[in-house]
Structures are given as C-alpha cells and as structure tokens.
Image (cartoon, rainbow, N blue to C red):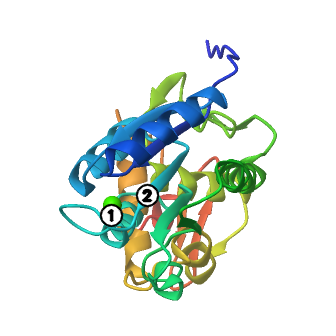
Amino acid sequence: MIKSIEVPMKKQILIVEDEKQILQFLQRGLTYKGFAVLTAATGEEALSIAVAAKPDLILLDVLLPDFSGLDVCRSLRFADMGALPILMLTAKDERTDKILGLESGADDYITKPFDFEELVARIRAALRRVERIRHRSGKIAIGDLVIDTDLRHVWRADVQIALTKREYDLLELLVLHANHVLTKERIFEQIWGYDNEAGLEIIKVYINTLRSKLNAGGKPDLIYAVRGVGYMLKQEVREEGRER
Ligand code: CA
C-alpha cells in the first residue's frame, strides 16, 4: 500500500559564504524567519552538501576561496538540479549581466551590503516561483506506475523507485502527457531548456536510465519511442516500438 504522511516542512536554504560574520548573520536571520539553514564556506563544500541534502534554495556568494560561485552554479545545473533556485550574493562592482547570464544559471542576485528584509522577500519570491511550476494535483497513476507530483515520489507495483531530480522531471512530463507523443525538441526545451551544452541525444540517455529503473525485475516497458519524433508514455508498449 502507498502511504504518505503530510508534515508541514520548513523550506531548507543552503547558505554558501566564506565571510564568517555574514554567514552567521544570515544563518541567524533566516533561522529566525522560519527556514531550515545549512551552511558551506567553500564551493566544494557547497556542491557536496547541495547534492546530498537537496535544499529548496541556495544563497551563493560569488567570491569563494576555492572556486567561484558562478562555477558552483554551473556545476549544480549539471548535477540534475536544474529547477533549484539559486540567489547570488555579489559585491557592488561585480558584473551582474555575467552573474545572471545563461551560462551561470542563477535565478536572481542581490548586491552586498544588502537589506535583510529585501533578501527574505527575494528568497520567498524565488521559492514561490518554483512552487507554482511544481504545483500539480497529487498522485497520478498509469497502470502500476504511480507518481506523486507533490512529493516527487515514484512507485512501480507499490515499490518506490529512486530517481534523480532530472529523471523525475522527465518522467513527470511524460506522465502528464501520457498517451500523447512528446517531440524530442519539446522534451529538451522543458527539461534542459537553459542548458546550451547538452544536445538532443541526452534525452535517450535519460530515457534508457528511466527504463532500467522502471522496468527492474522484468516489468513491461511503459515508454514508447516514436522513431525520429520523440517519446510517449502509455500503459502497454508494443515490442516493435522499443528503441534499444
Ligand atoms: Ca566571499
């Protein structure tokens, strides 16, 4: 049986800042505002914490002792954290066009010294944007496949399946358009849109990973490949439709 327990969750923010005073100020302030706070003082720490803890938002200083916040940002975008909002902390003279440029992938920036209430407002706005994108109507079932679009959980025949963020995004897109063919271009635009360096062939890599996870133990394939066009998810897939 599938059970889910609704617990009001605090939004978790990862603060990446090497200046101790600013870090402590932000940590205290955001904790007081009701956020769960994680901290990192270097880019390397930031990446490992972000991947392990999957925070709801990252507050990222641009100038870090090891590598720049822009590099951290880029790395996160390649680590299946495409929808994670990133708010950059910058000094006044740093070029905001570069920070907000497509190649870094930041969502917003705030200039130091900043007004704390303004920062909190920006954080809440970024979190709301993500919520609006993500908010759908709970659980959807296609045959024995169930996805929970609120919790982003997936089950096949009552067994929960662990997916990376981007694998989940791709599966959700297919499920929301079940029985309709999605072109590769549309899939790419929806899931990788901001990412110039990946090509359409990345989709097949992800489809194959999804298949191996969803079909574990010899379960029938749900993803139908339409040669030269794209993919469709449906309950039963004919053998000749498979693309290996
Ligand atoms: Ca710094």
- Across and down, in percent, residue 128 comes to 75, 50
Ligand 1 sits in quadrant:
bottom left
| Label 2 packing within 10 angstroms: few (<14), some (14-19), many (20+) | many
Relative to 132, 78 lies left or right = left
* Mark 1 secondary-structure assignment: helix
Q: Residue at x 24, y 46 (%)?
A: 45
In the displayed structure, would residue 215 be above or below residue 9? below
Q: Which residue is mark 1?
A: 72
Instruction: Return the residue nearer the eye: 240 or 133.
Output: 133
Instruction: Return the residue nearer the eye: 212 or 100.
Output: 100
| Label 1 packing within 10 angstroms: few (<14), some (14-19), many (20+) | many
Q: Which residue is mark 2?
A: 60
Q: Residue at x 50, y 80 (%)?
A: 227
Q: Are marks 1 and 2 in contact (CB under 8 Å)?
A: yes
Relative to 91, 115 lies left or right = right
Earlier residue among tags 1 and 2? 2
* Mark 2 secondary-structure assignment: strand
Q: Residue at x 44, y 71 (%)?
A: 203
* Quarter in which the C terminus is drawn: bottom left
In the displayed structure, would residue 122 be above or below residue 180? above
Disc 2 marks which amino acid? Answer: Leu
Quarter of the rendering containing residue 115: bottom right
Report, in whole angstroms, how far the alpha carbon at label 1 lies from the one at label 2: 8 Å
Relative to 23, 135 lies left or right = right
Q: Cβ of disc 1 within 8 Å of ligand 1?
A: no
Instruction: Return the residue nearer the eye: 80 or 215.
Output: 80
* Quarter in which the N terminus is drawn: top right
